[in-house]
Amino acid sequence: MGLVTKTQAPLIGVDISSTAVKLLQLARNGDRYRVEHYAVEPLPPNAVSEKNIVEVEAVGEAIRRAVARSGSRAKLGAAAVAASAAITKLIAMPAGMDEDEMESQIELEAVNYIPYPVEEVNLDFEVLGPMPGNSEMVQVLLAASRSENVEVRASALELGGLTPKVIDVESFAIENAYALMAGSLNVPPDGLVALVDVGATMTTLNVLRGGRSLYSREQVFGGRQLTEEVMRRYGLSYEEAGLAKRQGGLPESYEVEVLDPFKEAMVQQVSRLLQFFYAGSEYNRVHHVVMAGGCAAIPGIAAMVEEQLGVPTSVANPLANMTLGPRVQANALAQDAPALMIACGLALRSFD
């Protein structure tokens, strides 16, 4: 199984993060999409650690519960490996080759780009189009990940009752979902957009230029720090703290003493990730910041990033222009939308 395969039957996008399984199934009518099914199912603590699946049975069980709760009857699933667990390279190949010739040639070439034995990796490629300035060559995107990364995700889908049809790379899934929002951002065609996904334990920066991923970096920081501070300060269990964060019911002092310092820390993380990007590239500013992930739903965070970094900032909602199927609750979906970028990008693979 390659990293990228074509599919037509409905496909469930399954984003496996460190604290939850997020699942999304889309339908398409003309150029309009509809959210048919979705669910977010919590994972037991430490089943996934920093994007590595540690307890595949626990993840499979969570996928099974999420599918049941979403009401979907689809049998095919798509998941993704972290960008840090994948190697992607743009290479030039002669234009006249057919698919089979290209495949054998790329397997020979891959040795030069991959630091592992070729038999230990899953490889795939996509022809992007002619090389700028050279019509005899085409640009090919090569993607590879160690087979164990691909297989553990395929196993989790199978344990959840799904047939693994696509194992993608998170940064490609984000590109796919970003394409749905790009038109509303007022960014020049080759402008830089920083997409910052603040999850429970990891924050990931993807910088996109013309809709293509240019740079990706992860660091350990996320909403779990806020949950743990709520637990410590108010004597709550992990579950109670998570609920209180989302549904309210904490003392009045919570905002000033706990939430505001966390928001400050979050802005600092965004700033730091961008500094790393500027330091290692020819760029020194981005045109827009898009906040994604569970923490992007914290009220006021986009305004705070915009004010402190001086860059227009918005909250991701790849589903904003979609209609909803009868089983989907609009208010729950709106709350979860910023965290559904990867699941959305994977679900879009149904229409490749």
Image (cartoon, grey):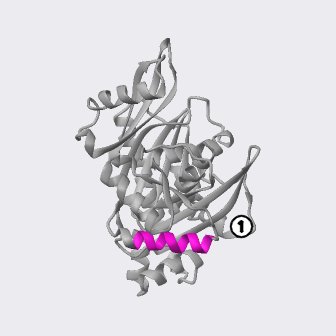
Q: Quadrant of residue 232?
A: bottom left
Query: Is residue 223 in sight in this rendering?
Result: no
Determine the secondary structure under disc 1: helix
Query: Is residue 289 in sight in this rendering?
Result: yes
What residue is shown at x 57% (from left), y 62% (from top)? 75
Q: Amino acid at mark 1?
A: Ala
Decide if residue 204 is on the left or right side of residue 350.
Answer: left
Q: In this orientation, which residue lies closer to the viewer: 17 or 119?
A: 119
Residue lying at the far bottom in this picture: please name it. 235
Q: In this orientation, which residue lies closer to the viewer: 334 or 85?
A: 85
Kindly identify which residue carries mark 1.
330
Residue 344 point in image, percent of width and height: 58, 54
The vertical placement of 186 against 20, above or below, is above
Q: Magenta part of the protein: which range?
A: 58-70
Residue 305 point in image, percent of width and height: 52, 52
The secondary structure that dominates the magenta segment is: helix
What residue is shown at x 39% (from left), y 73% (from top)? 58
Q: Quadrant of residue 112?
A: top left
Residue 143 point in image, percent of width and height: 39, 38
User: Does the stretch in magenta take in 126?
Assistant: no
The vertical placement of 186 against 76, above or below, is above
What residue is shown at x 42% (from left), y 55% (from top)? 203
Count of numbered marks = 1
What residue is shown at x 63% (from left), y 67% (from top)? 72
Residue 54 point in image, percent of width and height: 32, 66
Q: Quadrant of the C terminus?
A: top right
User: Does the stretch in magenta take in 68?
Assistant: yes
Label 1 neighbour load within 10 Å: few <14, some 14-19, many 20+: few
Q: Quadrant of residue 140?
A: top left
Decide if residue 155 is on the left or right side of residue 289.
Answer: left
Decide if residue 130 is on the left or right side of residue 83.
Answer: right
